[in-house]
Amino acid sequence: MHVRGEFVSKSVKPAPPTTLVIFGAFGDLTRRLLMPALINMTRLGLVGNDFHVLGVGIDEGNDQSLREALGTFDAKGGEGDGEKGDAWARLKDRVGYLQGDFTKDDVFEQLKARVNGNVAFYFAVPAKFFGTIVDKLADHGLMAETPHGFRRIAIEKPFGHDLASARDLNARILARVSEAQIYRIDHFLGKETVQNIMTARFANMMIERVWNSDCIAHVQITAAETVDVGTRGKFYDGTGALRDMVPNHLFQLLAMVAMEPPASFDAEAIRNEKGKVLKAVRVYSPGKAKRNGVRGQYTAGKVKGVDVPAYTASPDVAPDSRTETYVALKLMVDTWRWAGVPFYLRTGKAMTCRDTEIAITFKPVPFASFPGAAADMLPPNRLIIQIQPDEGLSMDINIKRPGLEVATAPIALDFRYADEFDIGHLTGYESLIYDLFVGDQTLFQRADAIEAGWAAVQPFLDLWAHDAGMPEPYEAGTLGPAAADALLAHDDHTWHELAPAGQTVP
């Protein structure tokens, strides 16, 4: 049956009356993602006329100038600009601005006078301000909750830059507010396909029964980007691909794939199971980290026909930089379910195509009696969970090829969200912000999971910090360095070939 689905069902109630305070009101994150998401939420009825936005920032301005700046948004507009514009017209008069230095006390005294009831504070600012803002909020009584008003904070990544700093930041924040008030955002978890991983597993017996080391040979998690560093050289050269993507985005996908069935689907039960997975990721010795990790750095090349300069020729990047723009890791999850199953993670910039996916490769059949088709010649069954850009799932299976002879052929059973559901106008932040307002922490990271992720990548950070060698070069517009292919070849595996948007690789 082909049914066109809706994002919001009639059973979903609007969020309670809330004021969203955004630190970094004129920033790129606010303009490009947060405000479009809030406009979509207004259009979909997820927030009502009792919802308000108060921006805080050091930029010169007032209520009107912020509204004008945010009114230039480039949101994806549902069924046309008219509907998007109508939602903005209803929301804009409830958008205000408080100018000031949010490292100073006077701003928070003014803020205290302007908010009451339910308040969520969104940190759309550089990570160096996270601890300071929490301290100031707590010092001025802005985090004190009452039976008539919650107080919550939403923190964007990066949450720390290594294990020690993540522990320090957690300790600093948790000294002032409770874990129940903290919503550590990973925008990957706002994507429908990511949330669907649990449903696909736990609502389908035929999938969950084979979701283990008896049937699965290996798992690949990929986040490939076509964009280069561009104008973000100053940030990126001090961060690199490993810190930027692995302990947050890719580990959240790993946790969703590898978690045990939760006792219930409340937030803490799910976060408990995800935390157990991340704590079970094997922490390597320096020698094993060297054998199981690859770092690369792109050189000049062409991406989709456009010339891309070498990473070291980018603005604000040191010409002798050893920062990696690509990383591939082989990780092991030491649980009974996943014993012996390697998890291969890779992410990089300036690659062939934009593609975030999870590829589950199943073990080959033990014996094949088809003429001329030995078991080791049949392509393996695979489940491809496409996170972006074309959200969906694809299952590779083998069938009989039409004709008089008994010959096999691989085919793909495909599902694309866009074919069934109207989600193309969403940013991915709508569900996360809604959950922030209603108090559902299911899709948000907990302190122990954050620290477990950093613990697993710390051996690679330490190794590469002391390794005088350069990352392996790869030409912009390619799939990464040769060493990444060798990482899998050592186990007789190959990377799943990435497909440009709109295409499926058989």
Image (cartoon, grey):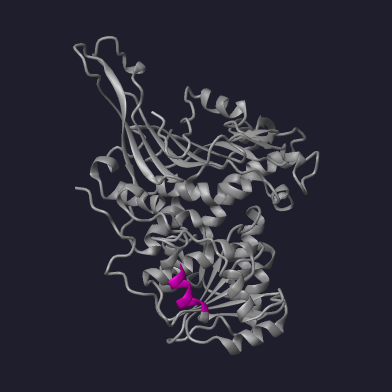
Q: Residue furthest front?
A: 82
Of all residues shown, which one is farthest toward the top?
372
In front here: 238 or 506?
A: 506
Q: How many numbered marks appear?
A: 0
Mainly helix, strand or loop, the magenta region? helix
Residue interval drawn in magenta: 85-92
Q: Nearer the viewer, residue 487 or 324?
A: 324
Q: Is residue 50 magenta?
A: no
Quadrant holding the C terminus? top left
Q: Quadrant of residue 286?
A: top right
**Left or right: where 92 falls relative to 148:** right
User: What residue appears at the point 39 percent right and 42 percent down from the top-left corner?
Assistant: 385
Location of residue 20 in the rendering, given as x and y in whole percent from the top left corner = 52, 76
Please identify the quarter of the rendering in which residue 337 is found: top left
375 vs 314, left or right, is left
Of residue 81 and residue 39, the one placed in the foreground of this image is 81
